[in-house]
Image (cartoon, coloured by chain):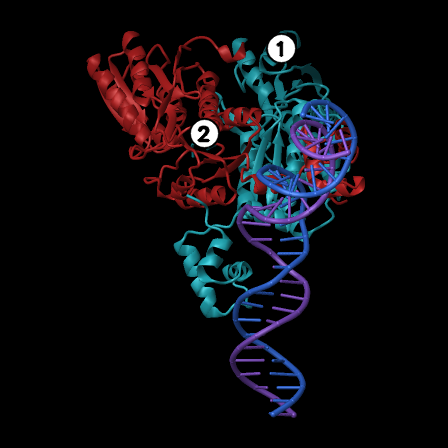
Chain colours: A cyan, B red, C blue, D purple
DNA sequence: ATTGTTTTCGCAACCGTTTGCTATTGAAAA
DNA sequence: TTTTCAATAGCAAACGGTTGCGAAAACAAT
């Protein structure tokens, strides 16, 4: 079956397509009587506008591009959900592109966004992205772009992410005030800005509380587990900080395997999206790096830029508020 | 900055837009010399075709709609990833719409897909969806639609999901051959087709092995935990089957709380996407309901329909192959 | 009766590409 | 020299809407 078009409706009623177009959007130029007749027919024939045509004419796609490294990692599903929620509520549509931690794919994805005329872009950079030149085309067109979560410093785009240094300080603070003096920090890939910032927070807080510390860098869960095991044996910590879900997932088994009890023998605090710490036994105190809220915040910020036609590149840094979820004995996720 | 168009290029070179259009796609009608000149200019000026126009003209969007209840639930992130992978590899784009387990939102999302001229649709129905009438518009246009994972029986659309009954039988079989005789099955919302099928499998296998069984229905993790706790006290099982991640997440804490050891006092087997069973302590044997593969399979099926212009509504049922991951003592996810 | 003002609707251009057909060449074949 | 035929490039319609402007008719004011 062919799609019903404005022309079809116009032909059937012997009026001009422009009249139909206006009638359907309640333009006052069209008489009430005719207007109703047109709307009735449109409904009867189940007319739906062809958005490709609308978009072309209006030069607006109502499409938002979302480029992420990997839809499956701990954090991103919630981010997608948060973004999608806000986007849909504002009559935008979400084009989801995965880069698979691959810079070339990311560039390709940006190109796809450009060609499809996205009105705005939300992008979480891959770990390999060290320049933002591939965003230039979109920038030239004044299309708002927001860097989400994984960002790089040298740029003038808006960014939405948590204050990594502060978040880490809060975690270490908690360890310190609950009595820990010897703390191991488990960190991810040391080339990432995120890792560096959290490392900074770790160092600052450690100095403040005069803690004895040790640092473990690990790429991925398994490496974290192996390296931490050795480190624990040598260093004999009474507290461990995991900077991410990936490292936490390695840290907890390592601790258990050595026969240490959490938190009696060794406290654990992590920065996490929240699922893992509450599923582990025992549950772990964590600083909530809330993907859902981060997604919502980023999307809202983008939408407001779009609607208020603000300067698309205001170079703002928006920090997601964080809070510590003390979780040593309860399972609030079961509530 | 304005976007460079074919017209711009044509104007600059004093040729017709059709010439430029053909040159850029290596049409033999255009002389090699001119063709190269055009391509060079296009590259220099960083020309990108406007897909909205292309789509309108070609009446093809290369867009695939994905409608899911909730992007954050255990299973769906992997499904999204699998689909996205295959879709991108075939030069399609993914429009992701969430229904939030809400039928009206689902209908709205279908409408959005229709208006945006998706070339195909992948849809995981909400729990409230009991009819497929809202798909009629797309069906009338001969747009291929594939039901993924959550399906309903009464329809003639293609479906991709696991053989729930068989999967359950495999799980119960494993419990039986490892010596369990008294088994509790923990099931989700009893109105869902998926629950019914898994219940059927449970019953069939229980009969086959002459097991004594008990059934618990629970909506959500917390309810599963509460109901199962009581049930365990009364029934004294030596094996527990959880039909989903949601129920499993309730079952394991319930068992532990009663002081029972897994698997010494009570074996546990679940149908699961795989993350949770491998994160729990101890790790749980599970039948892998693989979202990643399911997504890939569904997407591939859709793409092949699109490319081969097959009958869009062949009413096929495609079952994802399943396999049991015996996981009582190892943590393969750390490998 | 004339002029002015609304109301109601049509005309046609436009958004950026694609594509069937035609027109203009120059060279090979007759 | 005339005919034939490629090779090359242009013309214009089409995709399905939107929108500025003008036209006709109806009504009010003078």
Nearer to the camera, B271 or B67 = B67
- Residue D6's x, y, as percent? 67, 27
- Residue A260's x, y, as percent? 54, 12
Nearer to the camera, B299 or B54 = B54
Nearer to the camera, B51 or B148 = B51
In terms of image quadrants, where is residue B60? top right
Query: Who's the residue at 50% across and 45% down the image?
Result: B115
The answer, for residue B17, to whether it is visible in the render is yes
Horizontally, is A101 left or right of B122 in the view?
right
B81 lies above or below B133: above
- Residue C14's x, y, as percent? 68, 52
The answer, for residue A297, to whether it is visible in the render is no
- Marker disc for residue A232: 1
Element type at marker 2? loop
In terms of image quadrants, where is residue B154? top left
For label 2, the residue is B309
B6 lies above or below D5: below
- Residue B197's x, y, as percent? 29, 26
B62 lies above or below A235: below
Q: CA distance from mark 2 to mark 1?
A: 61 Å
A31 lies above or below A323: below
Quadrant in which the C terminus of chain A appears: top left
Query: Who's the residue at 79% across and 41% down the image?
Result: B14
Horizontally, is A12 left or right of A272 in the view?
left
Query: Who's the residue at 52% across and 43% down the image?
Result: B116
Element type at marker 1? helix
């Amino acid at each position: 079956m062919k799609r019903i078009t404005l022309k079809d409706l116009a032909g059937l009623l012997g009026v001009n397509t422009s009249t139909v177009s206006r009638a359907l959007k309640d333009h006052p130029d069209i008489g009430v009587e005719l207007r109703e007749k047109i709307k009735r027919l449109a409904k009867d024939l189940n007319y739906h506008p062809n958005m490709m045509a609308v978009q072309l004419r209006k030069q607006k796609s109502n499409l938002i591009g979302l480029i992420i490294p990997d839809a499956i990692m701990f954090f991103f599903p919630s981010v997608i959900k948060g973004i999608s929620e806000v986007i849909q509520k504002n009559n935008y549509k979400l084009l989801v592109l995965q880069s698979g931690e691959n810079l070339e794919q990311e560039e390709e994805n940006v190109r796809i966004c450009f060609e499809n005329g996205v009105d705005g872009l939300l992008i979480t950079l891959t770990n390999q992205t060290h320049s933002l030149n591939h965003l230039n085309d979109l920038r030239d067109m004044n299309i708002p772009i927001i860097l989400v979560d994984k960002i790089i410093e040298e740029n003038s785009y808006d960014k939405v992410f948590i204050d990594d240094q502060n978040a880490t300080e809060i975690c270490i603070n908690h360890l310190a005030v609950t009595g820990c003096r010897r703390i191991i920090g488990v960190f991810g890939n040391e080339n990432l800005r995120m890792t560096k910032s959290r490392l900074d927070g770790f160092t600052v807080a450690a100095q403040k509380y005069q803690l004895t510390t040790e640092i473990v860098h690990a790429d991925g869960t398994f490496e974290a587990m192996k390296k931490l095991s050795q480190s624990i044996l040598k260093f004999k910590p009474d507290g461990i900080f995991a900077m991410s879900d990936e490292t936490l997932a390695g840290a907890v088994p390592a601790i258990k395997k050595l026969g240490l009890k959490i938190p009696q023998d060794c406290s654990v605090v992590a920065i996490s999206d929240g699922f893992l710490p509450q599923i582990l036994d025992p549950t772990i105190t964590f600083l909530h790096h809330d993907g859902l809220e981060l997604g919502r915040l980023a999307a809202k910020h983008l939408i407001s830029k779009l609607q208020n036609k603000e300067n698309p590149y205001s170079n703002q840094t928006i920090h997601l508020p964080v809070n510590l979820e003390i979780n040593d004995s309860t399972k609030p996720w079961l509530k």
